[in-house]
Amino acid sequence: MTAHETTDGDREATAPSDGEWRIILNPVSGSGDHAERVESLAAERGYAVERTEEPGDAVEFAERAGREGAERVAACGGDGTIHNVVEGLGRADALDDVTFGVVPGGTGNDFATNVGIRDVEHAFELLESGDRRRIDLGVADGELFTNSCIAGLTAQTSSETSSDMKERFGTLAYVASGFKTVREFDPLHVELEVERDVAAQSTTWTGEALCILVGNARGFARGGGQANVEDGLFEVTIVNDMPTSKMLTEAAVQQFIGSDTENVTQLTGDELHVTGREGEDIEFSLDGEIREHRDLSMHVRPRALSVVVGDAYEPEPSDA
Ligand SMILES: Nc1ncnc2c1ncn2[C@@H]1O[C@H](COP(=O)(O)OP(=O)(O)OP(=O)(O)O)[C@@H](O)[C@H]1O
C-alpha cells in the first residue's frame, strides 16, 4: 500500500513516497497531438516515458514494468491504452504493488473522466499530489477491464464510431452510432446469468438482446457517467431487441438507457455468464478493444488496483 492510499474510504493528503512515474505513452491515440507535450512535462519532472510503436506494445511494456518492480506506472492514451497497461500489470502479477496513473490522450477518455481527470496538465498535477483509491477491476475470460464490457450492437459498431460522435455523445456514442445501423443488425440470442454473491442471488435472463452493457467504472443507466467502482459489483444493462421504429433517434437512446422501461433490464452482480444460444461467436468490446467469444464469464476483482483520482471522482456516486 502507498503512503497515500486508504482502505477505509477516507482520503489522505500526504505526498506519495514511492518511486518516480513510468509513463507508457500511446502517441497515436485520440488526435495524436499529445505525445510531445506529455514527454516534455514528464522530462521536467524526471519521469520515464516509453512510447508504444505498435499495437501490443503497451501490454508488453507494462508487464515488463511490473516484473521490474516499478511502483508507479501511468498510461497515456485512451481507454484502450489504459486497458492494455492494466492487462500487462496483471500479467506481471503486479496489481497489488503498483500505483496506477492516467494521463488522458484518447478520444473519449471515459475512464479518465470517471476517475475525475480532466486533461493532460491536470493529470500531471494529480500524479504528484492526487488522492489514491483502490478500485474494482472486471475480469472477462481472464482479461482485465477497467470501464466496461459490451456485447452486441454496440460492440459491433464501436470500432466504426467516429471521433465526432464520441465527442458529442460521450458514453452514449457507441449506442447512438449502433442505432444508425440497426436495420442490418442481428440481435444477440443469449442466455445471461447474473450472480450476486452478497445475497447469494442469481438471476437468469434469456432472450434476444440488442446489447448487454456491463459497467465497472462506467454506468449506463440514468444517462451514463461514473459508476460506483469500489462496491464489488457490475452494473448490468440489458437492452431488449425491439422494433427499429422505437429507437431511431438519439433522444430515444437516451430515454431507453436513461430509465427503466419494459425494454431495459437493469441488474447488479459480481459474476456474470453470457452464453450464445446459436453456437456463434459473440463480439465483445472490452474498454473499446474488440474480442470474440462463444461464451463469456465475467467477475469483479474487488478493490484490485490503486488509482490516482481527481476531486470529481466520487467513491459513492448518487443514483439520482
Ligand atoms: N504506436 C501504436 N501504433 C498503433 N496502434 C497502437 C499504438 N499504440 C497502441 N496502439 C493501439 O491503439 C489502441 C488504443 O487506442 P486508445 O483506445 O487508447 O485510443 P483512442 O481509441 O483514440 O481513444 P478512446 O478509446 O479514448 O476513444 C489499442 O488497440 C492499441 O493496441
Image (tube, rainbow, N blue to C red):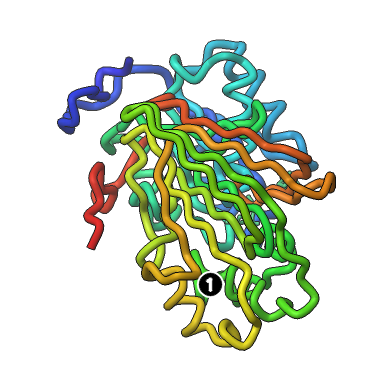
Q: Residue at x 50, y 74 (%)?
A: 169
Residue to which mark 1 is pinned: 167
Q: Quadrant of residue 153?
A: bottom right
Between residue 237 and residue 121, name the one nearer to us.
Answer: 237
Q: Quadrant of residue 23?
A: top right
Question: Residue 272 placed where, x, y %?
Answer: 54, 37
Residue 134 left/right relative to 244: left
Residue 254 left/right relative to 125: right
Q: Residue at x 53, y 72 (%)?
A: 167
Disc 1 residue type (three-letter): Glu
Question: Residue 47 placed where, x, y %?
Answer: 49, 31
Q: Residue at x 72, y 38 (%)?
A: 295
Between residue 207 and residue 127, name the one nearer to us.
Answer: 207
Q: Residue at x 43, y 24 (%)?
A: 304
Between residue 26 and residue 235, name the one nearer to us.
Answer: 235
Mark 1 crowd level (few <14, some 14–19, many ≥20, 10 Å Cα)? few
Q: Quadrant of residue 178?
A: bottom right
